[in-house]
Amino acid sequence: MNELAEVAVDAKHPAIKGEYYYIVPEHLKEKVQVGSRVRVPFNNKIVDGVVVRFLKQEDANCNFALKEISAVDERFVLPQFMLDLAGRLASYYAASIIDFLKLMLPPDVSLPKESLYSVTEAAKIESLRSKIQKEVFHVIRDAGSITSEDISKILGLSRTKVSGALSALMKKGFIKREFRVKIENRSYREDKPKSNFPGLTIEQAKVLNEIIRNMEEENKPVLLFGITGSGKTEVYIKAIEKVLSKGKKALVLVPEISLTPQMTERFHERFPGKVAVLHSRLSDGERFKEWYRVYKGDADITIGARSAVFAPIRDLGLIIVDEEHESSYKQMEFPFYDARQVVRFRAEIQGAAVVYGSATPSVESFYKAIKGEFAFLKLTRRVTGKPLPPVEIVDMREELKSGNKHIFSRKLCSEMDLALSRGEQVILFINRRGHSTFVLCRDCGYVLRCPHCDISLTYHISDKKGKCHYCGFQVKAPDTCPNCDSRNIRYFGAGTEKVEQEFKNRYPDVKVIRVDADSTSRKGTLEKMLWEFKSGKAQVMVGTQSIAKGLDFPRVSLVGIIAADVTLNLPDFRAGERTFQLISQVAGRAGRGNIPGKVIVQTYCPESLAIKAACAYKFKDFYKEELINRKKFEYPPFYFLMNLTFTGTNLTQVESAALKVKKILEEKVSPQVKLLGPIPAPRFKVKDNFRYNILLKSRKQESLIKAGEILKNMKGFDRKVHLSWDMDPQDLM
Ligand code: ADP
Ligand code: ZN
Ligand code: ZN
């Protein structure tokens, strides 16, 4: 008898979050299952929870009165493998099971439900006397499970008669009722399957064969290292077809769904009616329905960004992680999970195959591939047979010396003249939004800063305001210096708005669009802009990293990278890697169609290896050198990291809390764990909160997992200081 249920409870406060026992009341006995979402009394409130297991009264071993489960959501039950996954993740990231179960649950919206009837084993049809009941019973038995609406349609009987018969049959215990979400027959995309899809190139076919062979034999994760335009997506599609033919399902993760409209389009086209797309811009109702389709097994392929890794897919055969190097796979806030790591666990639990794909793999994955932990497959040629576009580096120091103070070098200008006069398209890339990164008084040196954060305000020309890119604080940009009244105010450090403005000054008749977080905040605008560019309505596109990924515009012949140093100078050990990836990805947008492409990279630091290697397409040089440095400075993949962040409004409290925790860790963790800090975080002050970091480094990840456990269980910690621990941090800022 399932007398008690252990429920993972979603308590507000982390210290009391955890699993608790509850009584399953008689009227819910049939309904509550392992994996059910329930409502339970907790701390004088009713909160959400998920049943993780059942146990007997005598095994509970508790001598106080337990409370009862108050309600259960009958629409779904999380499958056991999801509970297992949540458990694995909770211990890896030192969080509670419920923190991950929450990511797996659909939004709690009330959608219309309908009842489904099916026959029970106890049913004895011979004993039935009523003709209607007999007929109804037969219909149910033949259908397996059916709604009362459909029964009345089939029998041509009124709804009242049918429901009378149904309740009589229920009373006798001949039939049982289940609820399901009512999904109207809304038109899922019914694209016509096109017939003329490309056959694979020899290189693609080889890679596909290897993927399939690997799936059937050793089943190692695969790293597919394929240059931009080499046809990785086509390989994914074929591998998925293979998996589907075996009755299994596929999950495709992409960095951000709104940036990959072309990719989702392709999947819809190739697998009409079988694709579910989970993305952040869905309303709760839409999200529930899409989630429920996946849950019911009605979608063969689920596509989504990071959080889609928690989609309730049964019989999962293959997981694709496209653009695997993208840091957006990491959730930068609690519980700090990394979808790429979740994929590993999930694949293990469900026995699925994994393909990580990228033109610029992360250093960690590259290392795993050369060490043989991943199967290493390569696509070295573009499908079109066209070479990668030549890249030219422009040293901006030389430009300055020769008197050019503009943000466009002479070389870039002459290339733009040429491309525009030929009617070709141009992409200008700068990884910073706004107009200028800081506003400075030439006379007294005053810089406009955020009063709440440790950062200067970025000037935005559209509304003539200084804005904080950490907290959103904004002020009207002053005409005179607030400090000395001077009018000698200057704007430094270019962003997208400035590039757009300077472009317009130079080419007033050319249509240009700007794609960044400011210009695309409204739903649908990004898609619209990309379409405008694709269709040729705009000849030039200025943008941030949102335009670096996966886009395929065949008429782009010139790509200009305005300031390659922006990412290079960030205080983060991955700055070189990020710069290398960004340049390679942006460069890959040029020359994809029939016209040859060209790339101009402007930099103040042309001797940097990340820039040099990216511009010469010397991938191996970069990884080789980067691995040497990572080893020397003890960073991943040679060392595992965990970054602790202490946050609070009082600087002294933050500092002393950090020191206290360091001491505790020094006593308790393995001596081979290195504790660096506490030091003020690179983002030292955000929204009036001071931030300190301690960085843990270890050759053995086990020791870091243990450290996380210690932190999670730490009692009597300063309540005015918030502490977070980030396993495998992607961002040390
Ligand atoms: P990647 O994902 O590696 O950047 P894609 O899969 O997007 O490359 O392929 C680039 C372009 O080449 C797409 O327009 C795609 O339709 C096309 N393509 C891919 N494979 C083939 C093929 N075997 N024959 C012809 N065209 C192909
Ligand atoms: Zn001044
Ligand atoms: Zn701020």
Image (cartoon, rainbow, N blue to C red):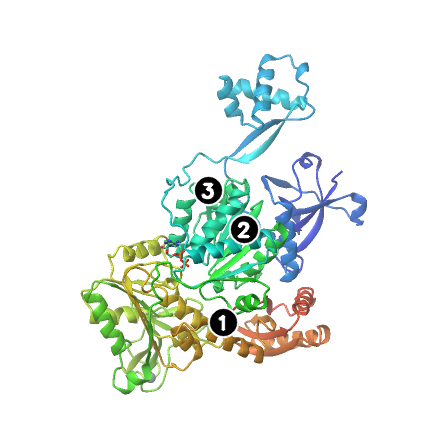
Give amino acid for label 2.
Answer: Leu
Q: Are marks 2 and 1 in contact (CB under 8 Å)?
A: no
| Residue at image mark 3 | 274
Q: Earlier in the sequence, mark 2 or mark 3?
A: 3
Camera-nearest residue between 410 and 522 = 410
Give amino acid for label 1.
Answer: Asp
Q: Is mark 1 within 8 Å of ligand 3?
A: no
State the residue at coordinates (70%, 74%): 664
Q: What x and y, as percent, mark residue 302?
A: 49, 48
Q: How far apart are labels 1 and 3 at the CA level?
A: 48 Å
Q: Residue furthest front?
A: 202
| Residue at image mark 1 | 688
- Horizontal side of 578 relative to 43 (left or right) equals left
Camera-near label (1 vs 3) is 3
- Against 297, is 504 above or below? below
Camera-nearest residue between 618 and 154 = 618
Q: Which mark is residue 657?
A: none
* Label 2 CA crowd tier, 10 Å (few <14, some 14–19, many 20+): many
Q: Earlier in the sequence, mark 2 or mark 1?
A: 2
SS category of the residue bearing label 1: loop
Camera-nearest residue between 243 and 174 = 243
Q: Which mark is residue 318?
A: 2
Q: Earlier in the sequence, mark 1 or mark 3?
A: 3
* Label 3 CA crowd tier, 10 Å (few <14, some 14–19, many 20+): many
